[in-house]
Structure formats: C-alpha cells, structure tokens
C-alpha cells in the first residue's frame, strides 16, 4: 500500500489532462511539490482582482464554482470544476490578476500545482500547452480574453474555421523509406516504385537524414539527361533537409513548408538533423488533416451531388467531434458546429432529391427538422425526425400537391438513411402523410394538440414543438410559430399536461443514492442517460420557453440561458441546468463514440468513481427544476 503523499497525488493526476501527457518521471517531480488544500462549502480560493498565485489548481474531490462578478455585484457562473478539472490558469498563461472568483460549492479538496516546477518539465510539451490554452480560453470572461477565445473557438464559422488547426498535432508517415549515401539513384527509384511513395530519405550510418529525393527531382534531373540513372543519390538529393519534432502542429508544418518552398518535412527524435529519423510529414498529410476541418467539411457538403459524398462528409464530422472532445473544446461550440453540419447535410439532401423530381415544387414549402436536430443539439447519428409544411392551395389541388411532397420526402428520407440517420421507428418522418401538411393543416394540428391535450398529444409535443427550418421558405414556419403562441394564450391546461410529462422521470438516483437502472429487456441493469437525465431537462426547458412566449431559441442550454436573463431570481438554477445539460450531453457523446452507438445506455459499473461523481452532481439541478415546475404549474395534485 502506498503511503507517500506524492505517490497518491501522482496516482490521481496521471489520469487527467494535461498530466496524462507528461512522462512518469516528470510527473513525479510535479507530484512531490503539490500542496493539498481543504475547503469548506463557501470558502474562496481566490477572488476577482486578487494578485495571481504561484500555483494553478486541480479539483481532487468536491466542486469549485468559478464566478464572474459584475460591477453591480451580480454573479454569473462561468464553470464548475469537478474532480480532475484544472482551473485558476491565469497566472500560468497570462500573469495577470484573477478575473474570476473560485468558491467551493461543497466540501472540497484541491491540489495546488506549483507553476515554476510544472513549467520546468512541460515547456517543450506541445500537447500540454495545447490543452492549457484551451482550458484557459474555456473559463475566460473579460473582453480581452473573450477576444482571444474567439480566435481559438471560431471554428464553427465557415470563414475562420481553420484557426482550430493550430491546436492539432500533425499526423505524419511513420517508418519512412530510406536509402544510404552510397545508393544509386536507380536503386532509390526502384524502392520508391515498390513502396508507391513520392520521396525517399537519404540517411547516414546513424540513420540521421542528410538529403531527400522526390519524384520531381527524378523528372527534372534524370529524365532531362542531366544525370545518368546510375548516378549516386548524393548527386541529385536536396540537402540539407528541413526537420521538426514529432509533436509539430499542422499549422506549424504548413508554415515550414511555405517558408522553405518544400513539400516534405523530416521528423526526427529531437527535431534536428543530428538525431534519428522517425517519420516524414508531407504536404498531402497536411491537406488530409485540413480535410477534417469544419469549413472544408461544409464546403464538401454544399458541393455534394450524391448521397455517398454526403455520407463521407458527415462521417468526417464524427471524427471531428471526437477530436474536439479530446481537446476539451467547450461543448457549446461543438453543438453549434454540428448543428451547422447536420442542417447543411439535410439541406443538401433535399436539394439533391429535388433534382430527381419530375418537376419543380408546385408551391412554396419548408423541410422541418424536429426533435434533437430541431433543437440544434444533435451530435451523433440518431434516427430521423422531420416534417414538411407547404403553402395553402385550393381544395381541388390539395391531394396532388401533397402527393408531390410525399414523393419528395421519400427520396430525402431514403437519402438521410443512407447517410447514417436511421429511419424513425414511430415513422415520425416527412414521408408519413400525417407529417406532410399545408400551413393551415399544421395550424389546425397544433391547435388540436394544445386545446385538447391527451397522452398522445403530449407525446408528440415533445418532438413537434421543437422544430426548425433547414430548407425552403422560413416564413411558413414563422407563421406556424405565431399561430402556436396565439393558441397557447387561450389555455393553461396544456402547460399542466406538459408539466406532468416533464415530471414522469423523477430523480435518476434511488433512495440509497444508487443509479436507477432498467429493470428488464435488452437494456436490463443499464442506466438510460437520455430518458432519466437529459429528457427531464429538455422537457422542462421546452415548457418554460413556451410559457414565457420565447421564440427563436431552440437549444436546451440556450433556453436556460435565456430564462436566466428573464428571471433573475432563478438565474442560479437556470445556469445550473444549462451546465448540467451540457455536461450530460458531453458524457453521452463520449460514451457513444467509445461504444459506437448513441451513448443512450450506460453500464454504470464501467465508470470510474470520478465519472459517477460528475454524473451525480448533474442530477441536483434536475430535482430542483422539477420542484420549480411542480410549484409554478400547480402539479402536485394534477393527475
């Protein structure tokens, strides 16, 4: 059993970024100098305006809330640091007084990491620097750092999205093909042909790179007759070579190639020509990495002429999500990015389908995304939820017009299925005649749901009241929204039904604070994070948004942020709900990527204690928002 405090600290921090990117010996040096701080609930570690400390911090147990305090003393939660999260990075990055206040949300243990020791062993570790800059930008508030954050996280905007590449380590070719100084060009060319490569590295006896030969050199120096094919490689090789270390970023690699007018970088053990060759970074490698860039993906989608191309682009986005989660990019930015990509995919699928139709649409229409895509928070592949709304037509033209759009919907739904979005088991898709209607028919449908609520109406409301336009005439969906809010003014009963539905899943924890898992079926003993944790927050946000007549805000976390503005008395609760939703969504997405599924069902036993703790902490706002609904809509005795 380990008794050393340093070893116990080491055993904990090695599991979390950025410490999981530090060599064991260096990590022990840091661990040996870490101080342990015990905080009671309400204790502050530092406050806005305090001089910067010579440590930054990591939460060991408990939770530390980071607040921004405005001039009128109102506080806004910027982040909550759980076990394994680092915070208080300003002294490490900017050497400025603190802009936020760090206060214990409950009894907490915090590790104080000395900055001088940390920097001495990580100054050349690009992976660590990348993480720290990202984490710092995530928790900043003031205008200066907000501007810096914008430079880092603008990747969901098409015109500046390549900025994020500065933080991506380049993927270079390992085990490069080489030849010796004594080789003939003919032997080198045969080796290049055999391995189907565009360059070969000339190395000395110690495997240090001394030159490079490319296809271009062979074409310009051998094919033109300047040198015979049997000439020694030293006669035509380019020397000296340009080298770099293995953790070079894509942006730095690109700059090196532009600066030296080359298409290849030799990757060596220490980054110099005087160490062992371990790889080659090519211009092609850079372009491949840039291809997983949001702006490039969006361009591919907008230019796609076939469903196959759309699927390939959407799969790239899946890889992008994983990369951004690993880099700890804020989930709000990932959500916005994926909303653009998903909407662009649907938009292009409709566009391609229209090209296959025998004629142009007979009237104006709109393709509506419903459910999670309608809320702009669909991250992984899920099943389809969509509908069509079209302009009113004379009664004698209605069936013909509707049939046109049903045929269109069948093509689009089929295309989306091929891309990776499964068919909805309940057939809540535009190809279903029930969900392909004229504007007036849709108004009547929503009026009926609102004025005559029943179990089916409330079930459908959870999907159809979250809609957004992804293709077509937005005035149609805007007029539908106006009609919905006008009808909501006529009744309070509908809100009670929605409220009761939002309470159908109580606390995700049982009496003994155990996770409530499925009791039977294929998912027996698994925890349903969607229905037990995410849906209560989603349903509550929808109800409060509708009752407050908030239009144009679809995302759950943005709904809570808007509610925090409108109801200052409940600001802390709504901000906690927004944070919990993002944290739960991030957890579900990571689980989905890990197990190659939706992430909906989780085997609790596979989670670490820290992961279970983070989940439990997200459940507190669920209980509080449900209590708020019960009081506000008088649901205690509503059956």
Image (spheres, rainbow, N blue to C red):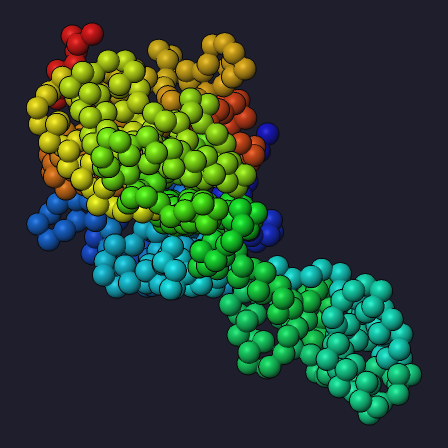
The quadrant of the image that shows the N terminus is top right
Residue located 20% across and 26% down the image: 444
Residue 609 seen in the figure: no
Residue located 13% across and 17% down the image: 493
Query: Where residue 296 appears, x then y in whole percent?
Result: 48, 59
Side of 484 where 79 appears, left or right: right
With respect to residue 86, does 450 lie above or below? above
| Location of residue 492 (image quadrant) | top left
The quadrant of the image that shows the C terminus is top left
Q: Nearer the viewer, residue 547 or 91?
A: 547
Q: Nearer the viewer, residue 1 or 500?
A: 500
Query: Where residue 152 appears, x then y in whole percent?
Result: 38, 60
Query: Where residue 121 appears, x then y in whole percent?
Result: 53, 59
Q: Nearer the viewer, residue 608 or 503?
A: 503
> Looking at this rendering, what residue extends furthest in the bottom direction?
226
Residue 1 seen in the figure: yes
Query: Where residue 295 appears, x then y in whole percent?
Result: 44, 59
Residue located 20% across and 42% down the image: 478
With respect to residue 485, does 355 lie above or below? below
Q: Nearer the viewer, residue 96 or 113?
A: 96
With respect to residue 583, does 203 lie above or below? below
């Amino acid at each position: 059993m380990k008794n050393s405090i340093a070893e116990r600290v080491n055993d904990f921090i090695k599991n979390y970024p950025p410490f999981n990117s530090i060599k064991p010996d260096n990590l022990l040096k840091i661990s040996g100098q870490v101080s342990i701080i015990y905080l009671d609930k309400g204790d502050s570690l530092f406050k806005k305006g305090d001089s910067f400390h010579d440590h930054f911090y990591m939460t060991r147990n408990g939770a530390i809330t980071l607040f921004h305090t405005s001039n009128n003393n109102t506080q806004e939660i910027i982040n909550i640091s759980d076990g394994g999260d680092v915070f208080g990075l300003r002294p490490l990055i900017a050497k400025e007084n603190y802009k936020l206040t760090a206060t214990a949300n409950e009894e907490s243990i915090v590790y104080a990491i000395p900055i001088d020791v940390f920097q001495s062993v990580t100054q050349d570790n690009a992976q660590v620097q990348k993480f720290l800059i990202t984490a710092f930008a995530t928790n900043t508030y003031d205008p200066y750092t907000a501007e810096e954050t914008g430079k880092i996280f603008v990747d969901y905007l098409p015109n500046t999205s390549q900025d994020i590449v500065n933080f991506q380590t380049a993927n270079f070719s390992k085990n490069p093909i080489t030849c010796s100084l004594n080789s003939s060009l003919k032997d080198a060319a045969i080796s290049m042909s055999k391995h189907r490569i565009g360059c070969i590295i000339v190395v000395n006896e110690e495997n240090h790179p001394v030159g490079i030969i490319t296809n271009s050199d062979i074409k310009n120096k051998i094919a033109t007759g300047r040198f015979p094919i049997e000439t020694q490689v030293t006669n035509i090789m380019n020397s000296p070579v340009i080298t770099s270390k293995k953790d070079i970023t894509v942006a730095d690699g690109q700059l090196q190639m532009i600066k030296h007018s080359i298409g290849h970088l030799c990757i060596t053990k220490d980054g110099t020509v005087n160490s062992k060759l371990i790889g080659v970074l090519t211009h092609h490698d850079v372009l491949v990495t840039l291809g997983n860039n949001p702006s490039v993906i969006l361009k591919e989608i907008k230019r796609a002429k076939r469903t196959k191309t759309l699927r390939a682009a959407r799969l790239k986005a899946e890889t992008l999500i994983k990369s951004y989660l690993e880099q700890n990019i804020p989930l709000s930015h990932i959500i916005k990015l994926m909303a653009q990509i998903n909407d662009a995919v649907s938009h292009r699928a409709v566009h391609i389908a229209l090209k296959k139709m025998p004629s142009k649409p007979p009237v104006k229409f709109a393709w509506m995304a419903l459910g999670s895509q309608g809320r702009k928070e669909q991250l992984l592949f899920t099943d389809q939820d969509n509908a069509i709304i079209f302009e009113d037509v004379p009664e004698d033209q209605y069936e013909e017009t509707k049939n046109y759009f049903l045929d269109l919907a069948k093509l689009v739904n089929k295309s989306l299925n091929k891309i990776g979005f499964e068919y909805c088991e309940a057939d809540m898709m535009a190809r279903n005649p029930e969900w392909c209607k004229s504007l007036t028919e849709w108004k009547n449908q929503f009026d009926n749901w609102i004025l005559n609520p029943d179990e089916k109406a409330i079930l459908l409301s959870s999907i159809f009241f979250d809609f957004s336009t992804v293709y077509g005439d937005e005035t149609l969906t805007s007029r539908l929204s106006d009609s919905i809010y006008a009808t909501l003014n006529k009744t309070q009963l509908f809100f009670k039904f929605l409220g009761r539905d939002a309470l159908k899943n109580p606390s995700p924890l049982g009496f003994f604070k155990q996770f409530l898992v499925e009791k039977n079926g294929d998912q027996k003993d698994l925890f349903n994070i969607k229905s037990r944790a995410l849906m209560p927050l989603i349903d509550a946000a929808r109800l409060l948004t509708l009752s407050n007549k908030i239009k144009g805000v679809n995302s759950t976390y943005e709904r809570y942020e808007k509610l925090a503005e409108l109801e200052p008395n409940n600001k802390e609760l709504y901000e906690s709900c927004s944070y919990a939703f993002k944290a739960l969504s991030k957890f579900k997405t990571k689980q989905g990527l890990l197990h190659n599924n939706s992430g909906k069902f989780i085997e609790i036993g596979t989670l670490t204690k820290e992961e279970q703790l983070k989940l439990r902490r997200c459940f507190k706002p669920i209980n509080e928002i449900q209590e708020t609904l019960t009081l506000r809509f008088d649901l205690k005795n509503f059956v």
